[in-house]
Amino acid sequence: MHSLTLVPRFYETDAFGHINNTVVAGWFETGRATVFEMFADPDDPKTMPLILARIEVDFVAQIYYGTDVEIRTWIDSLGNSSFHVCQEAWQNGACVARGRAVQVYFDHATQRSAPLPPDKRAKLESLTVKH
Amino acid sequence: MHSLTLVPRFYETDAFGHINNTVVAGWFETGRATVFEMFADPDDPKTMPLILARIEVDFVAQIYYGTDVEIRTWIDSLGNSSFHVCQEAWQNGACVARGRAVQVYFDHATQRSAPLPPDKRAKLESLTVKH
Amino acid sequence: MHSLTLVPRFYETDAFGHINNTVVAGWFETGRATVFEMFADPDDPKTMPLILARIEVDFVAQIYYGTDVEIRTWIDSLGNSSFHVCQEAWQNGACVARGRAVQVYFDHATQRSAPLPPDKRAKLESLTVKH
Amino acid sequence: MHSLTLVPRFYETDAFGHINNTVVAGWFETGRATVFEMFADPDDPKTMPLILARIEVDFVAQIYYGTDVEIRTWIDSLGNSSFHVCQEAWQNGACVARGRAVQVYFDHATQRSAPLPPDKRAKLESLTVKH
């Protein structure tokens, strides 16, 4: 499991007084950077052979400004050419949101999905332990 | 079905050269405003008796800067105390993203979900026709 | 003067209950698209020979969710290799924010500022009338 | 001087391949949290007696994804009822953006600016040393 600590930003709140729900999609993308780094050079992101096919977010509890949030990220459902990135946001000792992202390994040359190469698969496997 | 036309903003692009995936979560929230207006005064959003429990987004195709996007919104799975908001983003004649939001009718006094009142249910039913 | 109408988005509000100040910087960038279109193809934004050197925003009044905002954009201080983009945001018949962006014409080959070509200058001049 | 380290987020890039300019306005707001904390409880931000009157940002150099950014924040021009928050963004040992925010002490009861109370002024003075 990968852990990232974020400080909620004031502009991420909304008129309900809490962190806006749509912000969590961005936080989870930020947590997935640990996966992106396995596949591409951050200086040349266009070469990254990954496509995001789907995201799901379950909003479990209000998220507040003024307290750090931990984004936990791990790999699940590691298939032939795709895998799931599971994520949780924690604040004040409680899980406040859960997410899942379906990533597909993609060959830009053929414009099709492709089998995950063994070295990439090994890196992903190292992140499949939740705790 | 409710239709909203958005002009993609340059800051919504990312280094891949397209609209960033996380932006779509915000666009779909914007499309759901037609539902929020059924439940609360926009001048006093804190009174809105709706909670967003879950979102799902399927990314179907790249979304480009420079061309309008239509957000289509309709109601599905209208239950006793919850309902689904289905959404699609269309650009250049093709569906580029699909979304689903699970909304729960919520009584702030009891801090629990509650049955949808008949007048709200009638409003939601008027939005259940997709086309 | 160029006019663009925006619908404030709920996620653009903050815990003060109004539109967050930092959002206005993004709205003004969106209004400047009319200038960007004079200089580059929106499908290939990397070729745009413009650099943003500075922005200023004066926050005049609260901006509310639930009411359209008009972004007015015009050109001022048209110099040899730079110009100012002046902007105002209007809501409910009042100016709620004023902005200024300093844009520099830039030659990516030499990595230096360069004189504005006559055809670009003519396009900019057509936008120097405020009303 | 207050120092905050931020990790640039992928969705903060744009189609030019760098961090979008408008993002810096949000980062600087985040850096000003150290000032907001002097004036209000983060749990009740609506009570904060500060109004943002103006922001200025000078874009000095490209800001890249993949490398931390330090936001430096200090106080300047400490007046009777207003003050300036000066800010710089640093990346890879270079200043990449400079900002200034004009903050006004505001009495919500009278809806007017008001003199800074001595205790607030003392807190601000502690942040006037740049280095």
Image (cartoon, coloured by chain):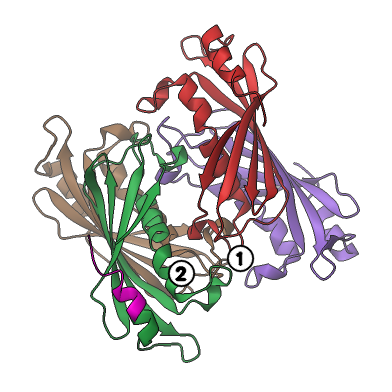
Chain colours: A purple, B red, C green, D brown
Q: Which residue is mark 1?
A: B17
- Element carrying mark 2: helix
The percent position of residue A25, horizontal first and vertical second, equals 60, 44
Query: A1 and B25: which one is in front?
Result: B25
Instruction: Answer with the quarter of the image where residue C31 lies.
Output: bottom left
Query: D81 and D70: which one is in front?
Result: D81
- Amino acid, disc 1: Gly
**Residue A23: in sight, yes or no?**
no
Q: Which residue is mark 2?
A: C37
- Specify start and end residues of the magenta stretch as a single range: C122-131
Q: Are marks 2 and 1 on the same chain?
A: no
As for residue D119 lying within the magenta part, the answer is no
On the picture, is A41 further left or further right than C96?
A: right
Whether B77 is drawn above or below C26: the answer is: above
Chain containing mark 2:
C
Q: How many marks?
A: 2
Residue B92, numbered label: none
Please identify the quadrant where the C terminus of chain A is shown. Answer: top right
On the picture, is A129 further left or further right than C44?
A: right
